[in-house]
Amino acid sequence: MRDTRRTRIVLAVLLLTAFTFITLDARGGEGSILDRLRESASSVFGPIERAAASVVNPVADFIDGITSINSTADKIDALEAENDELRRQLLTAPLDQSRLDELDRLLRVSSLGDYEIVPAQVIAVAAGNGYARTVTVDAGTRDGIKRDQTVLNGDGLVGRVIAAGPGTATILLLTDPEFGVGARLAASTETGFLRGNGREQMGLELYNPQAVVEEGNVVVTLGSPNGRPFVPGVPIGQVTSVIATPGGLSRLAEVEPFAQVTSLDLVGVVIEPPRRNPRDALVPTTDASSSPSPSPSP
Amino acid sequence: MTTGRVLLSTLLVVTSAVLQVTVVNRLPLPGAEPDLVLLVVIALGIVVGPTAGASIGFGAGLLVDLLPPTATEFGRWALVFCIIGYLAGQIQIDARRSVLIILGAVAGLAALSSLLFAGVGLLFGDPRVSGELVVSTTVSSVLYDLLLAPFVIPGVMALARRTALNPAAI
């Protein structure tokens, strides 16, 4: 050990400072000094992350484009025989197309549900070793995004806004253990609560212990007062297994989210809730039982 | 620390932290991801010693705590990286002799940083930390950090040593 007295003092002071920060932050709620510090940090680092992402994203898209084209070696050979112009088109078209498709589906969801959305691109992702499941997108308060707004993509619910800087916003993903949302079984009046748990599946708790729920049932958001943090009618996922709880006070089930939050690209933030509840209008139509039969409101 | 070293450390820490959230964390890897900032803190700590290492770690941690999309308490990574920087500074003399010692240090410090972070979480009642998740996160972090270490640590150490001899090197 090469410790001097000075080293020990420096270490002790730094550790004490960090510990004080953590304690203050753990106790302080919204609008604390540390909250404001974090906001100003996002206005400083937001543009840096946007710039970094604008360099990185095309490269990632290019790799995605390549891997999505060639499933077989024959196709690669065939492509190599094509001229340069054709190859360039083949490489860029799928990624333009996939972006277009994604935006298309997002717009479909927003028009079906009568939501007013702001499309945003994911530019930064939280580290797995920090345990929080959050991402940063390239739209912020300048685009009308505020704390506690619903975030969705073409597949369904993605999460909610937990912080908004001028040009960037942070989203808590639905798989995060701190994420919870009021939920309703589509085509029924059964309501409950859906929680993230750090894994791919979410836990659903239905308040009615006699509720009829089976595999394949679709779960949609129940909606919050004034549409914040959650607007009603957004599809969340499908029940994959029902947990037997004989004599329990509620009904438990596992739900797999429709949105793949591990590979997010384009998302939409709902900045204006719908005037009327879209009920089951947004439930994916591949499910045969999802004919839009209006059910009585709970 | 010379002005050159302060500048170099700041530059390296900011660059690695931004690359971490915009590139590394987006890789579709099972488990956690390699921690670029941790590797930079270890490499700088080895060169600059325990006192400066603790300060660099503290600063780097505060940056990670603030950089969007952060959702953890302010100061949590600062506490962890401060200890990592201090400990990396302790192995300074031995480390010059062998690559194996440095790799061993990376493995040990990576495991320690993961466990410390989870431990602080448990202390303050973080609902995200659970036993099963801590094990898988720690194991995958150590593995990825070891794989990335040969590409990061020698370069950072060489840069830091050069700025020690000639403050105007950068």
Image (spheres, rainbow, N blue to C red):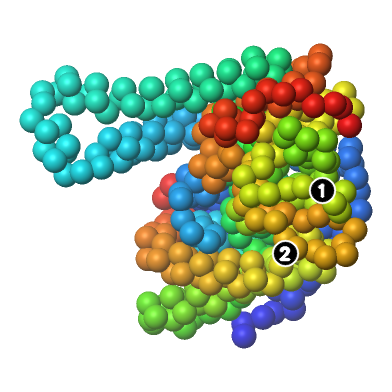
The residue under label 1 is A211
How many numbered marks are there?
A: 2
Say which quadrant the N terminus of chain B sits in.
Answer: bottom right
- Circle 2 marks a residue in which chain? B
Does A239 sit above or below residue A136?
Answer: below
- Category of crowding for the residue at label 2, using alpha-carbon neighbours closer than 10 angstroms: few (below 14), some (14–19), many (at least 20): many
What SS does tag 2 mark? loop
Image location (x, y in percent) of residue A288 = 57, 32
Measuring 33% from the left and 34% from the top, which residue is drawn there?
A65
Measuring 27% from the left and 28% from the top, which residue is drawn there?
A91
Measuring 78% from the left and 60% from the top, which residue is drawn there?
B127
Task: State whether residue A198 appears in this view.
Answer: yes
Measuring 87% from the left and 62% from the top, which residue is drawn there?
A248
- Circle 1 marks a residue in which chain? A
Image location (x, y in percent) of residue A296 = 85, 26
What amino acid is labelled 1 in the image? Answer: Ala
What SS does tag 1 mark? loop
The image's mark for residue A246 is none
Image location (x, y in percent) of residue A243 = 72, 61
From mark 2 to mark 1, how far is it between C-alphas? 32 Å
The residue under label 2 is B129
Task: State whether residue B49 appears in this view.
Answer: no
